[in-house]
Amino acid sequence: MEQNEKKQLVIFSLIAFGLPVIMGLFMWYGYHQEINLRIFPSAHMYYPAAAVMIALLLTEKNEPLLPKSFFKLFLVQTVIMIGSSILSLFITNKFLVAFSGFFTTCGSLVFCICLLLSKDEQIAAYGLAFKNRRRSLEFIFLFIFLYVVISVVIYLIDGDISPLFEIFTDEKTWRALFFSLLTFFFSIASNFGEEYGWRYFFQPILQKRFGPLKGVILLGILWGLWHLPLNFFFYTSPEYGMMSVVNQVFGCISLGIFFAYAYMKTDNIWTVVTLHFVNNYLGAILSADTSTAAQNYGISWKFIGLFAIIRLICFGWPAVTKFFKNPKNINPTPKMRVASITDSLKTAKEG
């Protein structure tokens, strides 16, 4: 592995996986003090992209294509979200929850504006280009279809599908779906926060080292374990934490395969950012929950095993395709992407 890439990987790993450990200690304290931890999951989503940006800013500070303003803006948002999470343990929580929601919305709007103001060559060099739009839409609609199929199967196995019919016949459901587009743009920074770290940066490096499929499975395991503080202190209670972690890992492996396939086919980070949003948002709607934060949910080993099998079948099928077996189909690493755009600009200038 190229020396600069090694440095980036080390910095990324220390921050992306170190921050959850540190913030997990604050969550442990807040949980035992019976404090609302609702801001922590939102802040958690910013860590992977922030880790990438810090790694790139430290190792490629003289690179003219580096979108420094865009990166620094995102890092400021990350720091504010981390600060809000910690402050929520010690001062009026309702105010901070409202502030974090408002800040996420405003931050996402500024995020979009700053992205639009970035130069085209910077966007292309750092994996931010919106391309292969038709193929991207195909993957988004396919994912929605598969997600609904999974929900139908789960309700059928449970022996009563009527709750699902009630959800789809409730006007609140359709109202929520109608406003989902606005919700997406108001929360785009947080959904981008995970995918820019996992798919843009980490996936190509792991695939280059371990192969297309093994790299994605390893990423799924690490992605699942990355949620550990949330599994113990937010999604469930500590007594069910390990069950929640196992469920999370299987979920991230299956989703990771589908997300990786979509990213490998489109080379469009916004495709998987959208898929990430749809996964979180549809989960809330199809469970008749008005909140996108899955807090204190029930869980059992039987459910974990059943859900893992269904999700692996519905989302994991790309793993057995020929496309996944071809090592040439992986996305370029950040270093390779910058080099390619630099060469293209140099050729155009000489021509």
Image: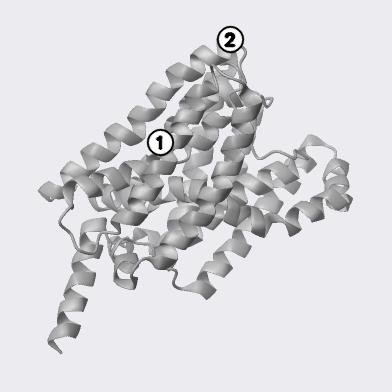
**Residue 285 picture location, percent across and down:** 73, 45
Give the amino acid type for the residue marked by disc 2 in the picture: Gln
Q: Mark 1 points at which residue?
A: 79
61 versus 248 height, above or below: below
**Residue 20 picture location, percent across and down:** 41, 28
Q: How far apart are marks 1 and 2 (CA)?
A: 24 Å
Q: Using the rendered image of the protein, determine whether residue 274 is visible from the camera's viewpoint.
A: yes
**Residue 56 picture location, percent across and down:** 24, 49
Q: Residue 33 carries which label?
A: 2
Q: Which residue is located at x 33 percent, y 70 percent?
A: 119
Give the amino acid type for the residue marked by disc 1 in the picture: Val
Q: Which of 110 and 344 is in front in this view?
A: 110
Q: Nearer the viewer, residue 119 or 144?
A: 119
Label 1–label 2 contact, CB within 8 A: no
Q: Nearer the viewer, residue 111 or 219?
A: 111
Q: Which residue is located at x 39 percent, y 51 percent?
A: 196
